[in-house]
Image (cartoon, helix red, strand yellow):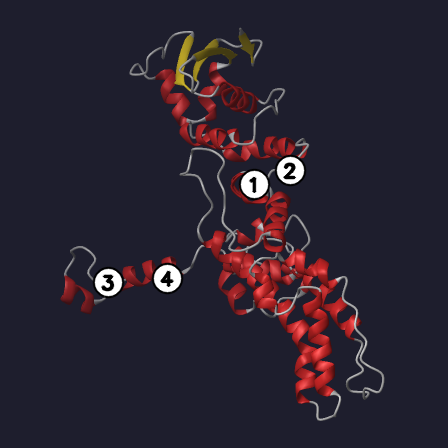
Amino acid sequence: MQTIIDETGDLVVEVTQKYSDGTSRMATFKVNRGILKKASQVLLTMLVSPHWTGGPQTTVSLGEGHIRVTEVWLRVVHNVKLTYTLQFPELWQLVEAIDYYALDITAFNPWFANWYAQQPVPPKPAELLFPAWRFDHARAFAKCTRDLAYDHIGHIMEKNPSMLHQYHLPSRLIPEQLNAAKGRLRTVLFRGLWDPCNSLLRASCACRKETLYDYQHHLYSIEVWPLETIFLNTSIHGILERLDDFSYEPRTGACSQCRQNYTGIVARVVSRVEEYFDGLCLDCLDRSKPKTGDIDLDYWRHDKLKEWEWVQGCRFPHRQSTWFFSFNGRKEERDRLVKKRKESDRTHPNYLHRFGTGSDSDGY
């Protein structure tokens, strides 16, 4: 059965999908030749070059491919009624098709946003990372990175449910920056819970020892202490939920220094950790969008930016920590600086004297 992409189309596109049981199925699509030519240089070459089978004909075979994926990219290219029937792992095949035919992926970003919004059950965060990043969905990327930082137990790793393992995030994002953000959450939590201990250890009153013991024992009784041990098998959110049950009041007769509001202290720690990280921001990751107007000034002013500057040009509001970890996740400027230094060195008389004009020998 033929699928009509363009009612006035002058070309039929064929694609054959092969299945694991050895069977195959062919589908045809009625499309507009001119629109395909404008969509990418690859399609233009295929349709006009005599070296491509069927170039000048009214039917062109794309060979082996995925039928639903083909329909999606043909509809996006033609800007006609879209379909959102792709299964989650098929998103990777869509990306493969976009790359193979050199299509403009930004044209697919609205399609992905609608696809994502229609999912009755959100994809697993570790699996959603790549599609959200590749289709530039800032809120989805922020949500899944935040969920992983707060809910994942152990080292965070990206997951790919497809067989196309060449598609993944840059390594500077996963695991580097996201695990760094998770580690920071752990540090903020530990410091907040440790502050009362630090105060009691410096005290000189007779009740300091039993107060210190009681405070830590109450943390121990709800299974959040010692934190480093608990953290090995519990997520940040899991620990925060346990801390909601914390309640401790020093014994009668304790001095005023020991009689702190420990329940309130812990509640404030929980609140601070819960609000600390909003996920990674795709706009802050984009080197072409420096917050100060200059990427180098961003680096030097990273701890002096005003609150409104953190979210300047971003598609969702977030706190300074999101900007910080996203900024550090940008592609290293080292490559740019090393390249600039090489080019400068090659024009220097000492370089020419030592190495001539041959291949690189400077060891950078």
Label 3 packing within 10 angstroms: few (<14), some (14-19), many (20+):
few
Cα distance in 3D space between marks 1 and 4? 33 Å
Determine whether label 1 and label 2 are within 8 Å by CB: yes
Mark 2 highlights which residue? 122
Task: Pinpoint residue 193: horizontal percent, then vertical percent.
Answer: 68, 72
Q: Which quadrant of the figure contains the C terminus?
A: bottom left
Using the image, tell me which numbered label, if any, was put on residue 277. none
Cα distance in 3D space between marks 3 and 1? 39 Å
Question: Callout 3: helix, strand or loop?
Answer: loop
Determine whether label 3 and label 1 are within 8 Å by CB: no
Q: Amino acid at mark 3?
A: Gly
**Residue 286 sits above or below residue 56 on the image:** below
Q: Nearer the viewer, residue 266 or 334?
A: 266
Question: Callout 2: helix, strand or loop?
Answer: loop
Using the image, tell me which numbered label, if any, was put on residue 337. 4
Mark 3 highlights which residue? 363
Q: Earlier in the sequence, mark 3 or mark 1?
A: 1
Image quadrant where residue 305 sits: bottom right
Cα distance in 3D space between marks 2 and 4? 41 Å
Image quadrant where residue 274 sits: bottom right
Label 4 packing within 10 angstroms: few (<14), some (14-19), many (20+):
few
Using the image, tell me which numbered label, if any, was put on residue 128. 1
2 or 4: mark nearer the eye: 2
